[in-house]
Image: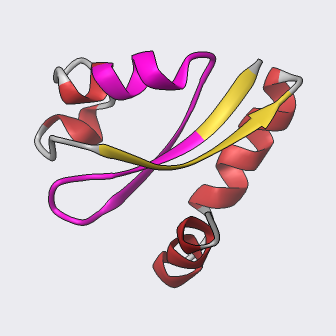
């Protein structure tokens, strides 16, 4: 399975990513081994995830989420 996830960083910002293992990826972010963006913003907390059958579908959704405004991302997270 392929996942798109959103984590909330310690500074309140939201980071969106793609992975095949959400829990491992969140642990990597918190260990400082994740994306450059999250390295100085730990700890991060998983606030949203979506599952997809194909990598291409997940990557397309990741791109779409990254294009959303902050307010739209907050609505997405609040709908959980």
| Picture layout, residue 54 above or below residue 17 | above
User: Quarter-wise, where is residue 20 in the image?
Assistant: top right
- Residue 74 sits inside the magenta stretch: no
Picture residue at 56% right of the left edge, 42% below the top: 5
**Between residues 74 and 38, which one lies in front from this camera angle?**
74
Q: Which residues are magenta?
A: 5-27
Relative to 63, 41 lies left or right: left
User: Quarter-wise, where is residue 11 in the image?
Assistant: bottom left
Relative to 45, 10 lies left or right: left
User: Quarter-wise, where is residue 66 in the image?
Assistant: bottom right
Picture residue at 66% right of the left edge, 45% below the top: 62
The C terminus lies in quadrant = bottom right
Q: Position of residue 18 (x, y in %)?
A: 59, 31
**Between residues 14 and 48, which one lies in front from this camera angle?**
48
Relative to 69, 41 lies left or right: left
Whether residue 64 is visible to the viewer of this picture, yes or no, is: yes
Relative to 60, 72 lies left or right: left
The N terminus lies in quadrant = top right
What is the number of callouts on the image? 0
Q: Position of residue 2 (x, y in %)?
A: 73, 23
């Amino acid at each position: 399975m392929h996942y798109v996830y959103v984590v909330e960083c310690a500074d309140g910002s939201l980071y969106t990513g793609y992975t095949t293992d959400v829990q491992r990826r969140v642990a990597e972010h918190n260990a400082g081994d994740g994306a450059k963006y999250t390295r100085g913003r730990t700890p991060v907390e998983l606030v949203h995830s979506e599952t997809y059958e194909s990598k291409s579908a997940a990557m397309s959704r990741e791109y779409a989420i990254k294009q959303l405004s902050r307010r739209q991302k907050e609505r997405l997270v609040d709908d959980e």
